[in-house]
Image (cartoon, coloured by chain):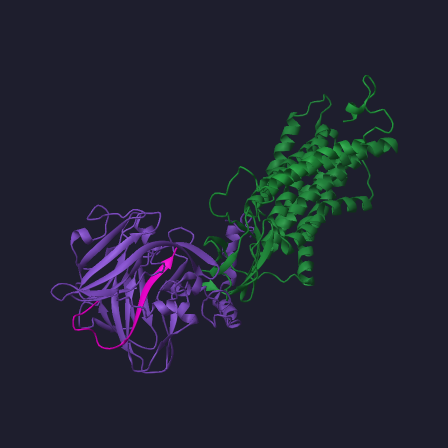
Amino acid sequence: MAGADSPVGGDPVAVAGQRVPSWLLALVPLLLIAVALGVFVGLGGPGLGERRGPPVEELAVEKTTLRPGVIELLVRNDGPDDVSIAQVQVNDAFAQFSGADQPIGRLHTAAVRVEQPWIEGEAYEVSLLTATGGTIIHEIPVAVATPETDVSFFALMALLGVYVGVIPIALGMLWLPWIGRISSRWLRLIMALTVGLLAFLAVDATLEGFKSAGEGSQAFGGPALVVIGAAIAYLSLSGVSEWLARRQQTTSAAGGSGDALALLVAVGIGLHNLGEGVAIGAAYSVGALTLGAFLVVGFAIHNTTEGIAIVAPLANRRPSVTRLIELGLIAGAPAVLGAWIGSAAFNSSLAAFLFGFGAGAIVQVVVQLAPSLRDDDGRLLHPAAVGGLTAGMAIMFATGLLVSV
Amino acid sequence: MTGAVPVLGASAVLLNSQGVLTGGAAARAAEHSGHEMDGAGGGHAGFRDGATVDHAANGFDPSDIVRDFDWGTTSRMAGGRTLRQWELQAVEREIEVAPGVSYAAWTYNGRIPGPTLRAREGERLRITFANGTGHPHTIHFHGIHPAEMDGVPGVGAGTIGPGGVTVYEFDAQPAGLHLYHCHVRPLAEHIAKGLYGAFIIDPAGGRPEADELVMVMNGFDTNFDRANELYAANTIPFAYMNRPIQARRDELVRVYLVNVLEYDLINSFHLHGNLFNYFPTGTGAAASELTDTVMLCQGQRGILEWRFPYAGKFMFHAHQSEFTELGWQGFFEVS
C-alpha cells in the first residue's frame, strides 16, 4: 500500500506524510481476519450444513463436598455444547437437589447441591440425568465429611506443611558443617547424590502431574498443562539464573555461583513441595489421608535429603544463619501454601499445572548443578558421580515408599 | 467420566483403613439420626421440587390412561357376531419421560402404553395397522390366533415397512389379560422405545362390577446403556405420587397389571395396607393367591382385585426398592 503510492525507485516508506505507521500494518491483517470471521459467522457458516448428531454432553466433577445430609458437586462443562441437568439420582434413587437450574455453558461451572442422608464410610454414585437422557456418573468411593475450612483447619494444614516441608529441610541443612570439611572428591559425590535426588523428584512430580491431569476436566488441556507448567518453570528459572549470574559478575567477584545455585535449588525444591502440599491437602480433605506420626516421620526422612541438596553448593562458604533460614523457608514453606490450596480449592487442572511447574523447575536446577559434578579431568559421569546419582535416586525411591499419598 | 476427587498414590490402602476406622456402628447411628429429609418429595424419592412432566405436550396423561379402555368400533357380521375394529398407527414421538428429559419414543397412536384394547370373548377382532415411522414394525398379539396373524417377521404379512399397512384379524380368545407389542429385530429396542399395550378379553359372562384400572409396568433407558434410568406404571415416573389414584372404601378395585419392562429380568407390584386376590393372566375364575406382592417377568400379567376397608392414602409400588425410587411408585387415595 505504501509502496504503491511511492515514486518508482524511491524509498517506499521514507516519504513524510505518506508513511504508513508500522502498528497499522500489524493491525490491518487482524482487522481483515475479524471481518472475515464476522461475515462467516453472520452467514451461519456457509457450506457447512447442519450439525450431525445429538449434542455432546460432558461434565467433569471438579470438587465434591460432603456435609451432613448434603452432597455438593462442583461441575464444569468440558464439552462443546451446553448441558442441562434435569434430574439427579444417588445410588439408583431420584434425589432432591438445587442449583444448576440453567443450562451450563462451555467451560462454565455449576454447583449441584443434592439432599442425601449419606452414611460415613459408605460408597455413593451420583448420576446426573441430562435433558437428552444422558447420565454423568460421579463415584464417591468413601463418604467422609469434608472438613470445614475455618481458621483451625487452615492452622492444621499449616502445621502439616511445616511438619512435612519446613522441619525436614531444616534438619537436612544441618549437614552443612560436615559438608564444609570433606574433600572435593567427596563433595562431588554429595553433589551427584543431590542431582540424583532431584532427578527422582522431577520424574515423580511429572508422573503425579499426569495423574492429576487425567482426573479432572480435560477442557483446559489435561496433560498438556503439565508440559506447559514445566516449560514455563524451566524458562523462568533459566532467566532468573542468568540474571543472578550477571548481577554477581558486576557486583562482587567473590559472590560465587554457590549462593546462586543454593538459591536455585531451594526455589526448585520449593516449587516441588508446593505440588506435594497440594496433593497432601487434597488427599486429607477427601479423607484419603490418615494424618499420623507415620506420615510425618516418612516425610521427615524423605524431605531431609532435600536439605542436603540445598546446602551442598554452599560447601566452601560460610553463609549466615539468616541466609540458611531463608533458603530453608523458600524450599519448605510452599508446602504450607500447597496444603491450603489442595484442601480448600483443589482443582485437578491447577494441580497438574503446579506439578509440571515443579518438575520444570527441578530440571532447570539439575542443569545448573551438573557442571559441579565434573572431576579434575573434566569428566561428568565418573564412577563417583554415577554412584552418587544412583544412590540419590535409590534414597528417594526407598523413602518415597513411606509416604505415598 | 472421572471425577475430581484425587485418589493419589497408595490411597487405596488408606481408604480401606479409613472405612474400618470410622465406619463403625456408632458413627453410622450418629450420622443417620441428624437429618431426616422432608423436601418436595415429602420423604419419598422424587423429581426435583416434586415437579412432573408436561402431560399436555406429551399428548397423554397417566391419570387418564389408568382408566382408559378402548373398546374400538363395533358392527354386526352376518350371523349376528360382533366385529370389533381398531386402527393403530406407529408414530415416532418426542416424549418428556421425566421433567426436563426428552426421549425419542416409538408409539402406537402417539401414547405409551398404546391404547388398552378391550373386547369380549368370541368376538371377531380386526386391527388395521399403519406404520407411520421410518422403521419397520409389527403388532404381535398374545392370545390364540392363526400363525399368519402373529405379527412376526417372515410369517403372514411379516414386517410392515415404513408407510406400510396391514390388517390383523382373529377371534377374541381366550378370555383374560393379554398384551401386544412390536416384534421386529432388535426386539429389546423396539419394545423399550414404547411399542406395547394391554389387550383385555372379557369373559363372555363378564366380570363383577368394579372400579377398573390398567397399569402397564415399564421403564426407559434414556442413555442407551441397556439399563433403565426410569421406572413407572403407565410411563411417567411418580405420576401417581403427584396425583393419587382415587378409590372408594369397600368398592371392588380391579387392576389389569401387565409387565413389559425391558432390560430387567423381573418387575413386581406391591400394595400397602391390604392384600389382593391374584388371577394370573386373568384366565381363571379362581384366585391363585391372596397376597400383597406379585412378581412378573416381561410379558407376564395378571388381574388384581381387592377392597379398601379404610380411608386414607395407600402406596403401591414395585417391591424392588431401586425401581421404586427410580419412579415406580404411587398412591391410592381412598375416601
The answer to which of B77 and B231 lies nearer the viewer is B77
Taking the magenta stretch, the answer to whether it contains residue B215 is yes
Total numbered labels placed on residues in the image: 0
Query: Where does the image place residue B236, in percent across and percent down from the top left?
Result: 40, 63
Residue drawn 78% across and 46% down? A326
The answer to which of B313 and B325 lies nearer the viewer is B313
Q: Is residue B118 left or right of residue A219?
A: left
Q: Is residue A165 left or right of residue A132?
A: right
The answer to which of B28 and B285 lies nearer the viewer is B285
Q: Quadrant of residue B273?
A: bottom left
Image colour for chain B is: purple
Q: Is residue A101 left or right of residue B68?
A: right
Start-end of magenta stretch: B200-221
Q: Quadrant of residue A93?
A: bottom left
Taking the magenta stretch, the answer to whether it contains residue B129 is no
Residue A23 in the image: above or below residue B21: above
Image colour for chain A is: green
Quadrant of image for the N terminus of chain A: top right
Query: Where does the image place residue A228, in percent across and percent down from the top left?
Result: 65, 38
Residue A230 in the image: above or below residue B153: above
Residue drawn 63% across and 37% down? A227
Q: Is residue B100 left or right of residue A340?
A: left
The answer to which of B84 and B37 lies nearer the viewer is B84
